[in-house]
Image (spheres, rainbow, N blue to C red):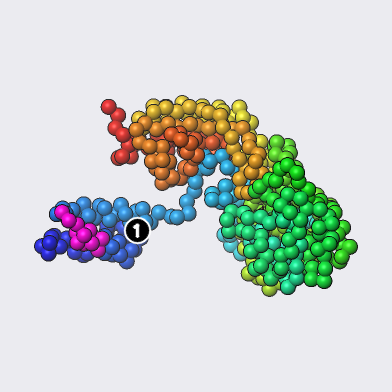
Amino acid sequence: MANIFRNIPSVNELLESPQLKKIVESVNHQVVVDGVRTFIDDLKETINNATDDIEIPSPAEMADKIADWLHVEQKEYLRPVINGTGIILHTGLGRAPLAKSAIAATVQIASGYASVEVDLASGQRGQRVKAVEKLLCELTGAEAAVVVNNNAAATMIALATVATGKEVIVSRGQLIEIGGSYRLPDVMECSGCKLKEVGTTNKTHAADYSSAVGEETGAILKVHPSNFEVVGFTKTVSAKELVSIAHANDLPMIDDVGSGALIDFAKFGLSNEPVVSESIKDGADIVLFSGDKLIGGPQCGIIIGKRKYIDQVLKNPLMRAMRVDKMTLAALAATLRLYRKEDTAEQEVPILRMLSMPEANLKLRAQKIAEQIQSASWLESCEATQSQSMLGGGSLPTQKMPTWCVAIHPRGSSVNRIAERLRSANPAVIGRVQKDTLLIDMRTVFPEQDMILVELLQALDQQDDAPQQA
Ligand SMILES: *Cc1c(COP(=O)(O)O)cnc(C)c1O
């Protein structure tokens, strides 16, 4: 046993190998030294624990292994992905891809200095929200607006501003959890408010709210149940009614509309998604929504409403902790500008383009890709197939859109293995595994990615563990 350790090359010996020298040059010395030490330690441990004799790899083989391992380690954790899942607002994949003009604005503003908090007309200090407030007010009819890091932050700061230490009345049918980490009761607790639940899971009446109002009440909160639906015998109280109950008691009505549709999504065949301007029209005092759901902009939380409340939010010390950076402001402003003409938004905002993509177009693209990869040796068969896409991001969970996918049936090696290899490609590709088939939904793949997809799928052939053709 002791002898065998003498056959392990030294750290310095391994560092002399050309593969590792190259990594020292491109990354740094310490990373490679650490990698070599870890590898040697692991090898010694394997030898110690082994019951049989172990063959020590040659120094060259070891250097190869260490280099491969370091290459994997050096891969960025955050990498571009071709989204073949068919889920348009995939939270795991960063929700909405940005419009070209939003990308250009972000790059331009990020590249240098910008008038983030300077009013260029007067030369005086300005509010950072000015970059988007006018647009938000114009598009929604609100008096004032402010932007924070996401809708969870918007909810927290709005509640902490108007109702801290007080009760906030919410229907039991609206106590939502979104994506595991967002739970309304927890957010409310963090903002220092007491949750006052009223009604039942399926039915809440106006009288439930009005009889719950008391000395302790700070606000009435309405929450859009974005990611679930209650069907059957149900009753909810409209925003208008809640506003009148709130105002009769000198309270603000806060409306968390969730996805933040600026236009009516019924035109895409998606019903029941509240439009932000409707809530303002109904008289809500504070309206909250995300920037990266149905608006198709950057991650942020938007708070609009009465000037009086927005000014209070701006003065809340939490604002400093939740404010957005110049890149978010640039991307949001550019995205909002597209909505001044609905047609322009539909043509330029990627998620709206995906929603309105004709089925015939998706079918043609799926057929073409299937044809082009037909001869790949790892493939058993491949064809265009009909399926269903989803909106995702916690929006409209029960409504699906007909779509077309490339259905991939790998030969021999399992579908999960193929899915794994596509995930480690560059760009990574993520599809839907359905039994023995990998589906790539064309609705969420950008047309300009079709060729890249074909090349990546063909390139799977060249990988060493691909089954060899006879
Ligand atoms: C998505 C959503 C949230 C959370 O928004 P984030 O921007 O993800 O923080 C809160 N409320 C509702 C109703 C939602 O749909």
Label 1 crowding class (10 Å Cα cut-off): few <14, some 14-19, many 20+? few
Q: Position of residue 78 (x, y in %)?
A: 48, 54
Q: Mark 1 falls on what kind of element? A: helix
Q: Where is residue 459 in the image (x, y as percent from the top left)?
A: 38, 37
Residue 319 appears in the rendering: no
- The residue pinned by badge 1 equals 26
Q: Residue at x 17, y 60 (%)?
A: 8
* In-front residue for pair 284/244: 244
- Which of the 4 image quarters holds residue 332? bottom right
Residue 205 on the magenta span? no
* In-front residue for pair 337/240: 240
Question: Is the CB atom of the residue marked by disc 1 within 8 angstroms of ligand 1's nearest atom?
Answer: no
Part of the protein shown in magenta: 41-52
Q: Which residue is drawn at 66% across and 67% down?
A: 189
Residue 43 on the magenta span? yes
Q: Position of residue 190 (x, y in %)?
A: 65, 68
Q: Where is residue 224 in the image (x, y as percent from the top left)?
A: 72, 52
Q: Is residue 87 above or below residue 411?
A: below
Q: Where is ligand 1, by quadrant?
A: bottom right
Question: Total of numbered circles in the picture?
Answer: 1
Q: What residue type is labelled 1?
A: Ser
